[in-house]
Amino acid sequence: MKADATSESARSEQRRALSEFFERSSAEPCALVVEGEAGIGKTTFWQAACAHARENGFFVLSARGAVAEAVLAYAALADLLADIQPQTWANLPDPQRLALDRLTLRSNDDRSVADQRTVAAAFLAVLEEIAERQKVILAVDDLQWLDPSSALVIAFATRRISGPVGVLATARTDDTESPAAWLQLPRPDAVQRIRLPPMRLGALHHVVSQHLGKSISRPGMVRIHEVSGGNPFYAIELARAFEADAAGVEIHLPGTLSELVRARLDSLHSDVQEMLLAAACLGKPTVELLASALAVAPDALGRLLEEAETASVIVLDGNQVLFTHPLLASAVYTGAAPAQRRHMHRRLADIVTEPELHARHLALAATHGDTATLESLDTAAELARIRGAPIAAAELLELAIRLGGDTPERQIRAAVHHFNAGGTARARVLLDRIIERAAPKPVRAAALRLLGLWSLLDGSSRVGADLLNEALTDAGDDLVLRVQILVPLAHAQVNTRRLDDAAISIADAVRTAERIRQPQLLSQALSMQAIVTFLLGDGLDEPALERALDLEDREAPISAFFDTTVQSAVLTGGVGRLIEARDQWQAIRRRCIERGEEIELLMFAFHSGLSEIWRGNFADCALIAEDVRERAMQLGGDLPRALAPMLQSALAAYAGQELEARSHAAEALALCHRCDHPFLVTVWPITTLGFLELSLGNYRAALDTLEPWLRAAEETPDATEIFVTPFLPDAIEAMLQLGQKSEARALIDTLERNGRRLDRPWMLAVGARARAMLLAAQGDLAAATLAAEGALLEHDTLPMPFERARTLLLLGQLQRRQRRKESSARTMRESLAIFEKLDAALWADRARAELDRSSVGRRRGSGLTPSEQRVAELAASGMTNRDVAAALFISPKTVEANLARIYRKLGIRSRVELAQHIRPTTR
C-alpha cells in the first residue's frame, strides 16, 4: 500500500506540474524538463503532453534528439522550424532571413557568411513573432542527443525569450548532473524539473499487457517488477524474453537491459539487422534512403520493414523510419562489428548528397585519411562555417585530424571554429600543440596571434601583449599576418597604458596595410590609429576615421574591439558630441540585435549609459544598467560583468546614495582588476569615487582617490578629453579646496590650452569654471565672475545639465560674495532647479544653502539666463561684440548667438532698446 500511495502521489505531482506549466506558458516564458533514466517513460509523457497542448490551442514546435553519429548541423533546429511558414521570417533583417533560409535548405546562397549568433537571433525573433499571435510550446525530446549547433541556438533563445513561450523537454539523467543544465530562462524560477519515478506493480502490469497483447502471470510480473526496478521499457523487454514452465513457477530472465535488447535484435533475420544498421547510421532514415543503401527492390525492403515493425523495433511514419525507442537504435549501432559499421557508412556516403553528411559518413567509414576523405571534410567544414555552424565545422575538422590529417593549418582552423562556438579550452589545446611541436615560424606566429588575441578578449591584456609580441617575432615577411598581429598588439598596449609603444605598433600596421592593399585590414588599422592618436591627446583624426569607415567591410565578422563603426562611435562620444554619438550607437544596436552580437550590445549599452549620464538622463541610464547586468550574467566574464556596476555606482553617486555608490564601485573595481584592463576600464569607478568624496565635502579623500590617475595623466599632458580624464575637474576643485593653488593652476592651464587647441566645449567649460575657482581663491572676484560667465557660454553648446548646474552654483556664490544678491538668487534658483530635476540630492542641498544665504525672495526676471544677462549688460554698456568676447574669454560668434537669443526674449531689435532694458552692473 505504501508503494502504491507513493506512486499515486508522484503521478499527481506530474499532473499538477504539467497543468501549471500550460497555464504559466500562456502568460510568460517557462519550462518543464522531464528527467529520468533510460526507458522510464519520458518520451511517452512528452508525446502525451504535446498532444494535449495541440488539443488546447497551442502551436507546438517539436524536435527529437538523434542518436546517430552522422547528423547534420542544426538538424533539430530545422525540425523545430519545419511547421512554420517561411513568410513568418520574410520581414526579418536580411542576415537573419538568409540564415534561416539556408538552415531550412530553402536557399543555397553562399555569397555571405552566416554567424551562429545571427542564426540564434533569427530563431529568437521567430519565436517572439509567433508568440505575439498564439500560444507556443517548444517541445524537445532527448535534450542529451541534440546536435550541438541546435543546442547552442536553443540555449541562446530560451535565455532571452520575453513572450509567452513554454519549453517542454526531456532529458536522460544518471545519478549526477542533469544534461539539461544549459536550458535556462530569463527568470531562474521559471524552469521546473520533474523526475519520473519507477512504476508500481499494477501500473507496470497494465503497460506490459497493453504492449504484448496478453497478460503476464502474477509471479512472473512480480519478478519482472523486481528485476526492472519499475522501468517500463526494461519490463517490456523482460516480459518478451522470459520463459516459464507450464505452472508459471520458475522464471529465467537475462540480467541486464542491454542483454535483453541484444537478444531481441539477434533473433531477427540478418537482412533485417543490416537494414536496421543502415537506419541507425542515418540521422533521419527514410524508405528511399534505406532502399538505396541496401540496393534492394521496394517490395523486398517492405518485407524487411514489416518484420522489424512486427518485432516493435521500428515504426513507419509516412516515409520516415523511426526506432520505437532510442535505446534500440543505440543497441543496433553499438552491437554491430566496427567493420560492419564502416562498410555501412561507406555505402551511405555514396548515396547522401548533402556535403556535410557525405563527409561525416566518409570519415566514419575510414580508418585513415585518404585525400578524398580529408578534402570532403574540409569542404563540409567550410560550408558549415558559411551556414553559421562553427561547432559543426570544428567537429568535421577534428574528424580529419583524427584520421591523420593533423596539419597545423587544419588545427588552426579547427581551433578558430571551437573558439567561435564557445569551446575556448579545446581551441587553446589545439594551438598549444602547434607551438609545442616546433611548427614553422609563420604557422607558430599564427597560433600565437590567436592565443594573444583571445587572451586580450578574455581580459588578460598583459598576457595578450606578450603572446602577440612573440608572434610578431615569428611572423617574418608575412605582411598580412604582421598587420593581423600589430592591430591587437596596439590595443593590448593601450590597455596597459604603453601608449608610445601602441603608437609605434599601429603606425607600422597602417604602413604595412597600405603596402599590401588589404581594405579591411587597413580599415582596422586606421581606426585603431585614430583611437591611439585620441588617447595621446592629438584629437580626433576625422579624415583617417572617415577613410576607415569607407574601407570597412560591414558584413565581415569581427570583434567589437576592432570594429571600425564601433570605434567611430566611441570616439564621437569621447570628444563630447553626445547627440551624434547617440545616433551612431542606436544604429550599432540595431545591427547587434540583428546579428545576436552580445559583446557588442554590452559595449553599446555601456557607452550609451555614459552618454545618458552626461546628458542628465539618469532614469534612462538606470534602465540601461539593468539591461547590461542581465546580459553580462548570461554572457559571463569579468569585463562584461564590471560594466553594469560602473554605471550604477555613478548613478548612485549623482543621487547622493553613498553606500550604494561605494558598493557598486567596489564591485566594479574588483572585476576590473581581475580582467586586467587597467587603463580604459578602472578610470570610471575611480572617477565616481572621487566625485562622491567631492560631493560629500571630503576633499582630501577625493584627491587621494584620484591621485594615481593624476600621476598617470602626467605622462600624456595633451590628453584631457572627457573620455580620458573625466576626473580632472573634480581633482582641480579638491586641490583648490585644500589650498593647492599651484598644482591646480598647472592642470587648469593644460585643460584650457587643450580645449582651445581641439575646440572642445567640455574642456573649455570646466576649464573656465576651474579658472574662476582659482581666481576666487586668489581674491579676484570680478575676474572670477567673468570666467564663470564665460564657462556658462561654453555650456550653451554642451548638453551636460549637471555640469552647467555646477557652474551656475559657482557663479551664484561669486555673485553673493560681491553682494549682488538678486543676481545670486536668480542664478542659484536656476542651479537648484537643475539639481532637483536630476535628483542630485547632495548638490541640490548645496544650492539651497547658498540660496538661503542670498536672503532675497523670488522676483520676476527678464527670462535671461545668467550668461545671457552678463552678455546683455556688457553690450548695453557700449562694448562691441569683439570687446564683449575679449572680456568674457569667448568668441565673437558666441556673443552674436547670445545677443540673438537676448533680443528674441526681450522683444527688441537694437542695442538702443537693449540699453533701455538692461541696467549695466558696475564691477
Image (spheres, grey):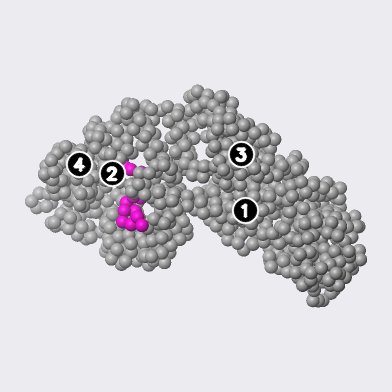
- Mark sitting earlier along the chain (4/2): 2
Tell me the amino acid under the disc marked 2: Gly
Horizontally, residue 399 falls left or right of residue 890, namely left
Identify the mark at residue 866; answer none if there is no mark: none
Whether residue 480 is visible, yes or no, is yes
Q: Could you tell me which residue is drawn at 24 percent across and 42 percent down?
A: 280
Tell me the amino acid under the disc marked 3: Leu
Disc 4 crowd, CA 10 A, few/some/many (<14, 14-19, 20+): many
How far across and how far down the image is residue 883, in percent?
86, 57
Tell me the amino acid under the disc marked 4: Leu
Residue at mark 4 to residue at mark 2: CA–CA distance: 12 Å
How far across and how far down the image is residue 701, in percent?
77, 53
Identify the mark at residue 290; answer none if there is no mark: 4
Range of the magenta residues?
68-87
Q: Could you tell me which residue is drawn at 73 percent across and 51 percent down?
A: 760
Q: Which residue is mark 1?
A: 581
Residue at mark 2 to residue at mark 3: CA–CA distance: 48 Å
How far across and how far down the image is residue 56, in percent?
30, 67
- Mark sitting earlier along the chain (3/1): 3
Circle 3 SS class: helix
Q: Which residue is mark 2?
A: 283
648 to 319, vertically: above or below: below
Disc 3 crowd, CA 10 A, few/some/many (<14, 14-19, 20+): many
Nearest the eye: 506 or 283:
506
512 magenta-colored: no
Q: Which residue is mark 3?
A: 526
Q: Nearer the viewer, mark 4 or mark 3?
A: 3
Q: Could you tell me which residue is drawn at 9 percent across and 52 percent down?
A: 247
